[in-house]
Image (tube, rainbow, N blue to C red):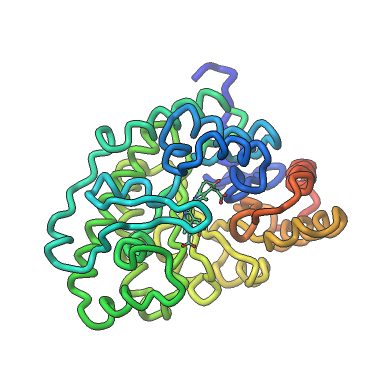
Amino acid sequence: MGVYSTTPHLLRAARGEVVDRPPVWMMRQAGRYMKAYRDLREKYPSFRDRSEIPDVAIEVSLQPWKAFQPDGVILFSDIVTPLPGLGIDMDIAEGKGPIIHSPLRTQEQIDNLHPLEPEAALPFIKTILQALRSEVGDKSTVLGFVGAPWTLAAYAVEGKGSKTYSIIKNLAFSDPTILHQLLAKLADAIAIYARYQIDSGAQVIQMFDSWAGQLSPQDYDTFALPYQQRVFQQVKQTHPDTPLILLVSGSAGVLERMAQSGADIVSVDWAVDMADARARLGKQVKVQGNLDPGVLFGSKQFIRDRILDTVRKAGNWGHILNLGHGVLPETPEENVAFFFETAKELNLAGVKG
Ligand code: CP3
């Protein structure tokens, strides 16, 4: 790095430095609400093509960067992308999500999984992340991401998204030994994958345990938390300075538990008031969030007020401003632009800690 290089804003805040305004990015900031993305989707109708052909994935990842200059640029990919590298065949159906052709339900299937060799299985990830880093330089932070063991196991066992999780819960609550073996194998593969993303240029890693909020807290302690910890511990061993974010969908009942995962930053959704989240998590835990994505369907005045309210409640340290979940389809791009402009004009000098 040259003498003039500076550490980007989001990375500094994520490491606990005091910054003049909270860094801001959005989950799913590249995607369906953007016309540029929908146009490209017509040319490349397969999600796997869009996310695995480097030139296309780079272009999609950079669409929001070019339009809004967010403080974070996230790799365009999916949480199930590494599964074929373990021997789990998958597809991503437009509008529906991941499909696993032979769902994993037997001991033999678990025994047949192989360790992830990212250089061989996921060479495109390195190409994409390297290109993103060189494109945004020090002006933004490149985020990588992974799915957590419980959430990837849910897809692998159910075979697709689920409303009830009845198949994986049947396994969990009647024959947990097989499931624990799967969760352990997934955790080790995810740690390898996260390290590979960091070595390829990702400066922050967010882990999505999207479906862990479907577990009772006591089952979260058995099937989600220990494997989140296993991933984060392994990554921290080799990459102690890379901030790690944890997101669980519908996390209100397990927020304190999320802070036990080893994550540096807990992503908070809009079902929890940010002031309450801060009080529950304590001063040492950094937070991300937590506007209702639906706020972006509101008036400009409403959007501005909600940003200010969130920033005041989060205080002047350890906050990454974000939505509580992904930006919704049909969100006006103009309001996304307004959200970023407003957020980038903030000054924390007047905000109490
Ligand atoms: O939604 C979450 O809780 C985040 C975790 C998550 C991702 N993929 C991360 C992601 C989950 C649960 C998935 C599975 C998945 N993949 C679904 C959900 C299906 C279900 O069961 O409810 C869907 C629809 C997909 C397919 C997919 N992935 C699409 C259509 C897109 C494009 C962006 C969009 O939403 O239009 C993605 C990209 C994707 N999935 C990203 C991430 C972090 C891209 C990076 C980003 O911009 O955030």
Q: Position of residue 330 (x, y in %)?
A: 70, 53
Residue drawn at the location 28% of the way across and 77% of the way down: 172
- In the picture, the quarter occupied by the C terminus is bottom right
Q: 202 or 147: which is nearer to us?
A: 147
Q: 278 or 345: which is nearer to us?
A: 345
**Residue 260 as seen in the image, left or right of residue 282:** left
Q: Position of residue 342 (x, y in %)?
A: 79, 46
**Residue 249 as seen in the image, left or right of residue 162:** right
Residue drawn at the location 49% of the way across and 64% of the way down: 248
Establish if 147 lies above or below 103.
Answer: above
**Residue 335 as seen in the image, left or right of residue 264:** right
Residue drawn at the location 58% of the way across and 58% of the way down: 287
How many numbered marks appear?
0
Q: 283 or 94: which is nearer to us?
A: 94
Establish if 1 lies above or below 21.
Answer: above
Q: Position of residue 285 (x, y in %)?
A: 53, 60
Q: Quadrant of residue 308?
A: bottom right
Residue drawn at the location 54% of the way across and 34% of the way down: 43
Q: Position of residue 75 (x, y in %)?
A: 49, 39
**Residue 32 as seen in the image, left or right of residue 196:** right
